[in-house]
Amino acid sequence: MYEDFIKAATIEINEEIAGIQSLLNCCKNNLDLYANAEKIQKHTHKIKGLAPMVKKDDLGLLSSLLDSILKKIMKNKKSTDLLEIFSISIDEMKKSMIFNNYDLDKINKRVLQISSNVYL
C-alpha cells in the first residue's frame, strides 16, 4: 500500500513540476511571472506538501521557498530576476526527481536569499 502511495505521489509531483514548467514557458519577463503567480503557486503548494511524504525534504523546502515568493508577488511585492530563478529552480526540481539524493542545498540557499529581497 505504501509503495502505491509513493508511486502515485511521485507521479503527481512530476505533473506539478511539468505544470510549472508549462506556465514558465509562457513567461517572457517578470511581469508575465507576476501575472501567472497564482497559477504557479497552486503547483508549488502541492509539491511542498507531497515532497516530504516521499522523502524529498529538500524538494519540499525549495517548493516552500518558491511558494513564499509567489505569495509575496500576489501581495504586489516585486523583485528583479525572479523569472530566471524560477526557471533554474524548476530545472533543479526535475533533476531531484530523477536522481536519488540530488543536492538542492545550493539552490535552496539562493532562493532563500532572493526571497528576503522581494520588496514592495
Image (cartoon, rainbow, N blue to C red):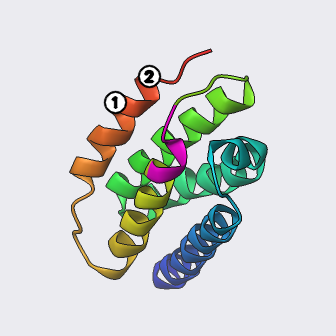
Local SS, label 2 = loop
Q: CA distance from mark 1 to mark 2?
A: 7 Å
Q: Nearer the viewer, residue 4 or 60?
A: 60
What residue appears at the point 34 percent right and 30 percent down from the top-left corner?
113
Local SS, label 1 = helix
| Residue 109 % position (x, y) | 27, 39
- In the rendered structure, which amino acid carries the disc numbered 1? Gln
Q: Which residue is mark 1?
A: 113
| Residue furthest front in the image | 28
Q: In the image, which residues are magenta?
A: 80-84
Answer above or below: position of 43 versus 85.
below
| Residue 49 % position (x, y) | 56, 52
Residue 82 belongs to the span the image colors magenta: yes
The residue carrying pointer 2 sits among few (fewer than 14), some (14 to 19) or many (20 or more) residues within 10 Å by Cα, namely some
Answer above or below: position of 1 versus 55.
below
Q: Nearer the viewer, residue 73 or 98?
A: 73
What residue appears at the point 35 percent right and 81 percent down from the top-left corner?
98
- In the rendered structure, which amino acid carries the disc numbered 2? Asn
Q: Which mark is residue 117?
A: 2
The residue carrying pointer 1 sits among few (fewer than 14), some (14 to 19) or many (20 or more) residues within 10 Å by Cα, namely few
Q: Quadrant of the C terminus?
A: top right
Proximity of marks 1 and 2: CB atoms separated by less than 8 Å = yes
Snapshot quadrant of residue 73: top right
- Type of secondary structure dominating the magenta stretch: helix
What residue appears at the point 27 percent right and 79 percent down from the top-left corner?
99
